[in-house]
Image (spheres, rainbow, N blue to C red):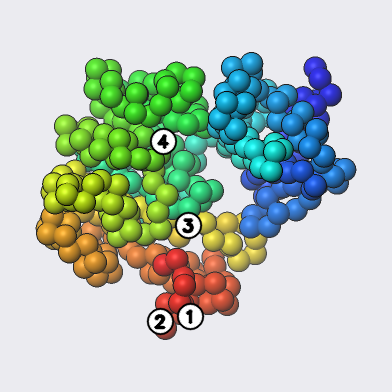
Amino acid sequence: MSEHLRTMHNLLRTVRQTQGASDLILAVGRPPQLRLDTEIVPIEQPVLAAEDTRGLCMSILTDDQRQRFEREREIDLSYELAEVARFRVNIFQQRGSCSLVARIVMDQVPQFDALGLPPIVTELAGLRKGLVLITGPTGHGKSTSVASIIDYINHRRRCHIISIEDPIEYVHRHKLATIQQREVGLDTESFHAALRRVLRQAPDVIVIGEIRDLESAQAALTLAETGHLILATLHTSGAVESINRLIDMFPAEHSQQIRTQMSASLAAVLWQQLLPKAGGGLCLACEVMVTIPAIRALIRQGRIHEVYSLIQTGKKFGMITMEQSMEDLVACGRVDADWLGANYFDLGKKKKKGSSI
């Protein structure tokens, strides 16, 4: 074993052994760093030079992965350190040097309650068709929520699940369901290539690791129309913004057609954010939009801006806004009201200008 690989394994063990640590960050000019909840904290190690970060990054890549990195200047992969943990790794180039972020993936897929997902998710996991979007910023638990839904289905339904991921994070074992996990770059060239042939694989549930472009957006909507349950993630902030984002991926002249298609196929949108928990740690705030007939009509008619008011008043359908979710977390003592007021809004008052909600 090379010295760089030995050092890299020691750093990954440190992530596992440090309470509250989620990420390892390597950058030139800094010592190795950990993300502890919302803070970046250095490990007691020497400052890294360019040759250090490159050696550490290259030590965990296969020959094929090294060639891909040299060609594309960035790569996503999963890396498993035996008897320690599995990690989602991104290696990228900045100012001519290598940097790395490795996020630990939990050994067991968490249950809905442990994640803090709202009760309506149980009903969404029981759907037989439709598109369910899990949205939010990078690093706020979208992949974990998707994995939890897959695990729920796996324990309750005899079906065939095809998951297309970049990279594979949680490894699912066959229970009642048969689960096929395909990694972009290893098992398929791209999301587009995998989705083009997925119907020939007789799926019941299709998981799209991320809707990134027009092709994956079109595939998600079309597959949902054909009677399949589609779970997909999207980097957006808010249910209404998610609808607009999907529509905006298509040429303007097709917007009416896409709105009609979306009104028929979109089942729900979950927007989630991780917030600092009072006393330490993180907790989940979640906005939920369920596509009831009134929302389908608004989407079809292009009156997307009116959807939010239906979410506000849709509690009986399992809907909740992000603001309502945050207020509930404050009310039960999980989030500090002063922190929330400083970062988002004053409870009972107008939303703070520039807020993401």
Spatial separation of the CA atoms under disc 2 and disc 3: 20 Å
Query: Of the residues under marks 4 and 3, which one precedes in the sequence?
Result: 4
Does label 3 or label 1 sit earlier along the sequence?
3
Mark whose residue sits in front, 4 or 3: 4
Q: Which residue occupies 40% across, 26% down?
A: 190
Give the residue displayed 77% in from the left and 43% down from the top: 28
Residue position marked by numbered label 3 in the rendering: 273
> Considering depth in this image, is 198 or 91 the residue closer to the camera?
91
299 or 171: nearer the viewer: 299
Tell me how far mark 3 sits from mark 1, CA to CA: 18 Å
Binning the other alpha carbons within 10 Å of mark 4 as few (below 14), some (14 to 19) or many (20 upward) gives many
Q: Sort mark 1 into few (<14), some (14-19) or many (20+) by Cα contacts within 10 Å.
A: some
Q: Residues within 10 Å of mark 3 (few under 14, many from 20)?
A: many
Where residue 59 appears, x then y in whole percent? 73, 24
**Amino acid type for the residue under numbered disc 2:** Lys
Residue 162 screen position, x and y as percent: 34, 25
Looking at the image, residue 327 sits to the left or right of residue 59; the answer is left
Q: Is residue 219 above or below residue 303?
A: above
- Tell me the residue that label 1 is attached to: 346
In-front residue for pair 208/98: 98
Q: Are marks 1 and 4 in contact (CB under 8 Å)?
A: no
> Badge 4 is on which residue?
209
Asked if residue 275 is positioned above or below residue 105 in the image, the reply reads: below
Q: Are marks 3 and 1 in contact (CB under 8 Å)?
A: no
Residue type, mark 3 in image: Gln
**Residue corresponding to mark 2:** 350
308 to 264, vertically: above or below: below
